[in-house]
């Protein structure tokens, strides 16, 4: 009979790399049992772990809930470990796990960058247990160390790209035979995304010249400039953790609010996400919004540039819920959050309406910022990465240790309804959107 402290950890999906299998290997090395549900050929490619129990699921999405419920029951699963918490299969698995008291570990890229990973109980952002109350943060912080932001290993875009392409293309070619009902979670087909990325690479030289021109112009004009770090439109931070049907809606609101409320000599700079594939056409779309709002000469878009330098030079930062908000807090720059984010805390982010932010923005409370970073690092973050060899080795050990850790590092917050999260700025946005 297994000892009473033994655990059975069920893994469901992971990044396009062998990272999650390495976490599983660490769990097994600690004497615990590991299961894995594969949903696609890409999942199979990333999970090569002898000794683990692999359970393929090739059925229809609507039949997955009873399937995963049976797996949880038949194998006496104690822990569910998954990448993120918002893909369709993950939502169903989490619901079944919660009904059974199974511990849920949502794993993702870190709230801190580079080389940090997030490991949260139950979920992230809207579903996180990170306190939003300043006094609770201050009470939890004493004795905790300051997080380090030194990189563990040189990030390799080539390694990331090779794994991503190999994983997705194997699914595109072979899923129709092995997993015919699986549907990719992104907004666009992988081949469409790869085609757009190749076109973006072909335009890279022209984009660099545009970046240089815009930054030189901003430096010469020396006018107060607000920064908007764009996120990926396909990101669940937008699709689930914000009130916006699409990131376009947030961009339109930001441009119009800036035009109507910011001082006339201020400028607005949008920075495209480094992994944006170009399908959104941000420069064209934002230029159209700026013309419609009557501020075409005051709104700019760049793809590239030193993010931290742009933050330090900015009058303030406007974000839906990007991890760039953490950078703004670290740099002591004024910040407003339009979606749900763990750092949307009074004293760190602006509490008033977006219309007032342009004239009333204040820097974060430095003492609260230090306490918040310490608490966030201690309770939800571990060092590691998904692709670089050294970062994967460190990260797999740290994630496994956090999964197997007894107790909880944060007191639970009453869970949000996953089918209808609460967004405190939804009404504000709708009122502004519906103005004539």
Image: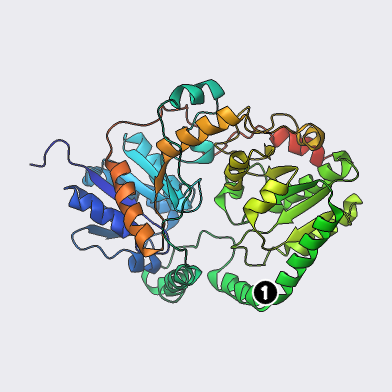
Residue 357 position in % (x across, y down):
77, 35
What colour scheme was applied to this rendering of the protein? rainbow
Could you tell me if residue 342 is visible in this image? yes
Q: Residue at x 63, y 73 (%)?
A: 196
Residue 172 position in % (x across, y down):
47, 73
Q: Residue at x 69, y 32 (%)?
A: 350
In the drawing, does residue 291 fall left or right of residue 167? right
Location of mark 1 (residue): 204
Q: Residue at x 82, y 34 (%)?
A: 359
Q: Residue furthest left?
A: 1
In the drawing, does residue 122 fall left or right of residue 354? left
Residue 80 position in % (x across, y down):
33, 45
Could you tell me if residue 37 is visible in this image? no
- On screen, residue 15 above or below 348: below
Q: Nearer the viewer, residue 215 or 2?
A: 215
**Mark 1: few/some/many CA within 10 Å (<14, 14-19, 20+):** few
Residue 178 position in % (x across, y down):
36, 70
**Picture quarter with the C terminus:** top right
Residue 329, quarter of the rendered image: top right
In the drawing, does residue 4 fall left or right of residue 21? left
Count of marks overlaid on the render: 1
**Picture quarter with the N terminus:** top left
- Helix, strand or loop for disc 1: helix
Q: Residue at x 45, y 63 (%)?
A: 154
């Amino acid at each position: 009979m297994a000892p009473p402290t033994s655990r059975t950890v069920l893994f469901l999906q992971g990044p396009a790399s062998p990272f999650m299998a390495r976490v599983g290997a660490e769990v097994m090395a600690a004497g615990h049992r590991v299961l894995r549900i594969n949903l696609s050929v890409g999942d199979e490619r990333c999970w090569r772990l002898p000794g683990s129990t692999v359970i393929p699921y090739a059925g229809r999405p609507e039949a997955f809930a009873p399937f995963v419920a049976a797996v949880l029951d038949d194998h006496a699963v104690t822990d569910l470990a998954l990448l993120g918490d918002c893909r369709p299969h993950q939502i169903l698995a989490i619901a079944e796990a919660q009904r059974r008291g199974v511990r849920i570990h949502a794993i993702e890229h870190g709230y801190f960058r580079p080389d940090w990973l997030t490991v949260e109980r139950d979920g992230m952002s809207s579903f996180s247990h990170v306190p939003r109350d300043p006094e609770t943060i201050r009470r939890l912080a004493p004795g905790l160390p300051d997080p380090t932001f030194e990189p563990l290993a040189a990030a390799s875009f080539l390694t990331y790209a090779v794994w991503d392409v190999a994983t997705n293309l194997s699914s595109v070619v072979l899923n129709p035979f092995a997993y015919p009902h699986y549907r990719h979670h992104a907004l666009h087909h992988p081949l469409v995304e790869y085609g757009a990325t190749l076109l973006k690479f072909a335009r890279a030289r022209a984009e660099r010249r545009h970046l240089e021109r815009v930054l030189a112009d901003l430096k010469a004009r020396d006018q107060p400039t607000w920064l908007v770090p764009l996120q990926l439109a396909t990101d669940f931070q937008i699709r689930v953790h914000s009130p916006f049907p699409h990131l376009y809606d947030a961009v339109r609101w930001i441009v119009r609010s800036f035009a109507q409320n910011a001082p006339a000599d201020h400028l607005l700079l949008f920075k495209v996400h480094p992994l944006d594939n170009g399908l959104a056409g941000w420069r064209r779309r934002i230029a159209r919004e700026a013309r419609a709002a009557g501020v075409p000469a005051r709104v700019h878009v760049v793809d590239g540039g030193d993010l931290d330098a742009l933050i330090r030079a900015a009058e303030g930062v406007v974000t839906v819920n990007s991890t760039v908000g953490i950078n703004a807090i670290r740099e002591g720059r004024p910040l407003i959050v339009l979606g749900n984010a763990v750092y949307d805390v009074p004293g760190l982010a602006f509490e008033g309406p977006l219309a007032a932010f342009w004239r009333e923005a204040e820097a974060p409370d430095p003492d609260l910022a230090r306490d918040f970073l310490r608490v966030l690092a201690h309770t939800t973050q571990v060092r590691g990465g998904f692709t670089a060899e050294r970062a994967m080795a460190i990260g797999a050990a740290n994630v496994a240790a956090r999964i197997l850790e007894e107790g909880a590092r944060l007191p639970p917050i009453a869970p949000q309804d996953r089918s209808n999260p609460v967004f405190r700025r939804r009404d504000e946005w709708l009122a502004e959107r519906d103005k004539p």
